[in-house]
Every structure is written in structure tokens, then in C-alpha cells.
Amino acid sequence: MNLPHLAPLIFAKEILFLSEKKAKIRCEFDTQPSLAMFIEASAQSSAAFFQEGGYTVGYLVTAKNIQWMNKSEDTQFIITLDLEVSFESMSNYSFIATNITEQKTICSGEFTISIQ
């Protein structure tokens, strides 16, 4: 993934599935992730929708309806993104993070990205 981040803050590692309005991204953390880390990983994952255009700068504008459902000691997760609406430079996504070993939902929510 083409991200303007430096280690250790690159969480989104691999695009597993991509369509016009849905993406599945493998994310990896060095430690057991916090809820804030999942939000950042989800925002980074939205870069999958912009890989064709090359380097693009995006900003996390809002995060809402965030729910922490289960804890997990895993460090690898799948972030599933749904593009809910996109208008000019703003896009709103919903996300679900599941752990790879049990495929259990860890957290979910929505966020808005502004692309420059």
C-alpha cells in the first residue's frame, strides 16, 4: 500500500479485496492494538481506493459510532471498509475490524476522509 506514513505507524499492509465500494485490508500491529490504533488502521486502509492515482494525501476528519466489541491478543486483523458516500474531496466509510485467527469482530465504526 502506498501510504505517506513512517514505521511504526504503517498498519495497513495488504489489499486482499477491492471493488468500487468495498475493500478488505490486512492490517498488522507491533503490539496489541488500542481502539485509536484501529481507527487509524481503518483510515489508512481507505488508501486502497486511491492506489491507481498514485500518491494522495488524505486527512481523517471525523470518527463516529465507534464500538469496541471484543478484545483480542492478535496483532493481525482484517479491516473491511464500505464506501458509504463520496462527494468531491470528502468520503465517508464504515468499517469492521476482525481478528484473523477467530474471525471475531473486534470493533466497528464510521469515519470521514478528506483527500487533497
Image (spheres, rainbow, N blue to C red):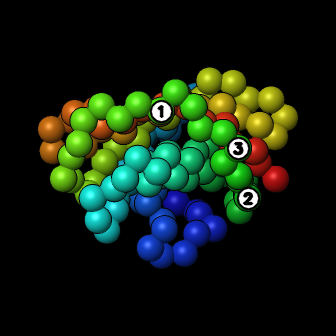
For disc 2, the neighbor class at 10 Å (few under 14, some 14 to 19, many from 20) is few
* Marks 3 and 2 in Cβ contact (< 8 Å): no
Please tell me which of labels 3 and 1 falls first in the chain: 3
Residue at (66% x, 31% y) in the render: 92
Q: Is residue 3 above or below residue 64?
A: below
Kind of element beneath mark 1: strand
- Can you give x and y, in whole percent of width and height, for residue 103 in the image? 21, 35
Single out the mark in the foreground, 3 or 2.
3
**Helix, strand or loop at mark 2:** loop
**Circles 1 and 2: CB distance less than 8 Å?**
no
* Disc 2 residue type (three-letter): Val
Rendered residue at 35%/35% (across/down): 68
Q: Earlier in the sequence, mark 1 or mark 2?
A: 2
Foreground residue among 95 and 37: 37
Q: Which residue is mark 2?
A: 57
* Label 3 – label 2 distance at C-alpha: 13 Å
Comparing 67 with 83, the one in front is 67
How far apart in space, not on screen, are marks 3 and 1 (Cα)?
14 Å
Tell me what residue is drawn at x 70 percent, y 34 percent. 91
Q: Tell me if 31 is positioned left or right of 54 in this view.
A: left
Residue holding disc 1: 66
The residue at which mark 3 appears reads as 61
Which amino acid type corresponds to the residue marked 3 in the rendered image? Answer: Val
Where residue 1 appears, as percent x and y from the top left, is: 52, 60
